[in-house]
Every structure is written in C-alpha cells, then in structure tokens.
Image (cartoon, rainbow, N blue to C red):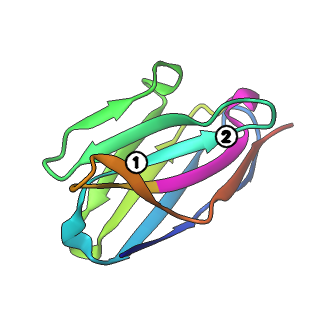
C-alpha cells in the first residue's frame, strides 16, 4: 500500500505562483510514476502533470510553459511548481501514484484546494 499526502494549496492572485508538494510512503517500489490531477466544479478530473521514475515529465496542454513537475527521490516527494496562475486553474488538486502492476493511478492523496482569484 502507498499513502500520499499533499500540501501547499491556498489562495493566490492571477499571475501569482504556488508550489504543491506530495510525500509518498509505504510500498514505494510499487510506484513507477507520480502525477497531479485536478478537478474543478462541473468539470471532469484531468491529469495536469506526471513524472516517471526515470524522470520523464508530461504535461497537459493547458499548463505547458507555466507548470513544472519535479521530484526528490531521497524524500519520496514530488512537487508541482505553478506559475502565471489563471482563474481557470482553480480546482482541487490531487496527488496520485501509478501502480507498476496495473499501470493505473491506484493511489490517491486527500486533495488540496487551489484558488486563483483577485
């Protein structure tokens, strides 16, 4: 089993920045990627960014050039640096880990609210 704990959400003005953190614990060897999803009211959950154990990063088109995902393997932690934030980035952001056995994101954090508003 894998446990994920997110932190770093909050309220920020348009154009501002925020950094999210996700600490993983448990059966770390079961994970081959970690990612960030978000879900806004009335919208489907979407994958924002992901990073593999090999360091390959992927981004949704809507955040390319603004968001950066990174990891600290020694701390079993991934980060999402969010710059040039827009009101449409407002959502609950969830950390997720991909299960190497299923290639599905089977492990989830509790979510952290990000609100971009003036």
Residue drawn at x 47%, y 47% is 36
Q: Nearer the viewer, residue 71 or 98?
A: 98
Q: Nearer the viewer, residue 112 or 26?
A: 26
- Position of 7 compared to 34: left or right? right
Q: Is residue 33 above or below residue 13?
A: below
**Residue 74 lies in magenta, yes or no?**
no
**Magenta region:** 86-95
> Residue 66: image x %, image y %?
49, 29
* Circle 2 residue: 39
In the image, is 96 to the left or to the right of 28?
A: right
- Residue 82: x and y, percent? 53, 41
Q: Is residue 87 magenta?
A: yes
Q: For the residue labelled by badge 2, is the local secondary structure a helix, a strand or a loop? A: strand
Q: Is residue 27 above or below residue 55?
A: below
Image quadrant where one finds the N terminus? bottom left
Residue at image x 50%, y 27%? 63
Q: Which mark is residue 35?
A: 1
110, above or below 97, in the image = below
Q: Residue at x 80, y 31 (%)?
A: 42
Query: Residue 61: percent from the left, percent from the top?
Result: 46, 19
View extreme (top): residue? 61
As drawn, the label of residue 6 is none
Give the CA separation, mark 2 to mark 1: 14 Å
């Amino acid at each position: 089993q894998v446990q994920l704990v997110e932190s770093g959400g909050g309220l920020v003005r348009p154009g501002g920045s925020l950094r999210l953190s996700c600490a993983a614990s448990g059966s770390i060897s079961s994970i081959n990627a970690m990612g960030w999803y978000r879900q806004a009211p009335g919208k489907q959950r979407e994958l924002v960014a992901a990073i593999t154990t090999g360091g390959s990063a992927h981004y949704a088109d809507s955040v390319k050039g603004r968001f950066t995902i990174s990891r600290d393997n020694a701390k079993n932690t991934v980060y999402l640096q969010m710059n040039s934030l827009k009101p449409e980035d407002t959502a609950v952001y969830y950390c997720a880990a991909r299960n190497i056995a299923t290639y599905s994101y089977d492990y989830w954090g509790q979510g952290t609210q990000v609100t971009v508003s003036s």
